[in-house]
Image: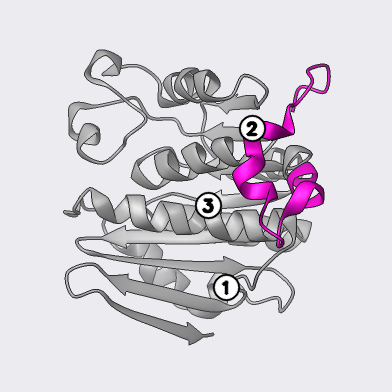
Amino acid sequence: MNTNQHIDLRRYSRQTMLAEIGEEGQRRLLASSVLIVGLGGLGAAVATYLTGAGVGRIGLCDPDRVSLSNLQRQVLYTEQQIGMPKVEEAARRLGSQSSSTRFDLHPDGLTEENGETLAAGYDLLVDCTDNFATRYLIDDICHRLGKPWVYGSIGEFRGQVAVMNHLNGRRYADLYPDREALCALPHKTAGVIGAVPGVIGAMEASEALKLLAGFGNPLDGKLFSIDLLTLSTLIIEF
């Protein structure tokens, strides 16, 4: 958050009127920081809702550029931005949404070399990636640093959300222990309806707000799954 700029809390009146948040919860959000890893369909939704909610500092981490096939679900971008770095275009769009939010751009993505240094500067990480290797990397980093993170994944008509490394200490490696086998799988492009990352990204943002402002019951060690084709849902503890 830009501390030199006055924040008018009337902007967040629809949140602060909620007893679970109030002005104290809103001030926590304004003072908080989140690293969003991945700015695709999930990241676009997460970044939009966290910015709107008043998270003070948001790290945008993604090495990719906007492509035509992104536009079906990655609602931060337009046709005019094709070929441009996602972190720059996302920051430009989000900055127009909230001039008081500070955006940190990380165009190299999250790697073994920079991951721990990047993550150390944020209160919370939100996984918006599409591969097992990066999720295990986030899991390892957050475990070493003692930081919680929000997991999300999508495919076809389905999606999942969970909170990792929070109070009960459950990790991604506990949910998916077959690390070597999963990371060895070839990466292939899967189909997905555009609304799925919108739904799951919004849920990830909601879980992040719970953790940052201290309200509600986060999915701590619980995996929520939804199938938008049938609207069936399931929550399992792991």
Q: Is residue 19 left or right of residue 150?
A: right
Dot 1: what SS?
loop
Q: Are marks 1 and 2 in contact (CB under 8 Å)?
A: no
User: Which quarter shows the C terminus?
Assistant: bottom right
Q: Which residue is mark 1?
A: 219
Report x, y in % for residue 212.
71, 54
Dot 1 or dot 3, earlier in sequence: 3
Q: Residues within 10 Å of mark 2 (few under 14, many from 20)?
A: few
Dot 3 or dot 2, earlier in sequence: 2
Q: Which residue is mark 3?
A: 205
Point out the stretch of residues depicted in magenta. Answer: 1-28
Distance from disc 1 to disc 3, alpha carbons, whole Å, reads: 12 Å
Dot 3: what SS?
helix
Distance from disc 3 to disc 2, alpha carbons, whole Å, reads: 18 Å
Distance from disc 1 to disc 2, alpha carbons, whole Å, reads: 28 Å
Query: Of the residues shown, which amino acid type is indicated by label 3?
Result: Ala
Disc count in the image? 3
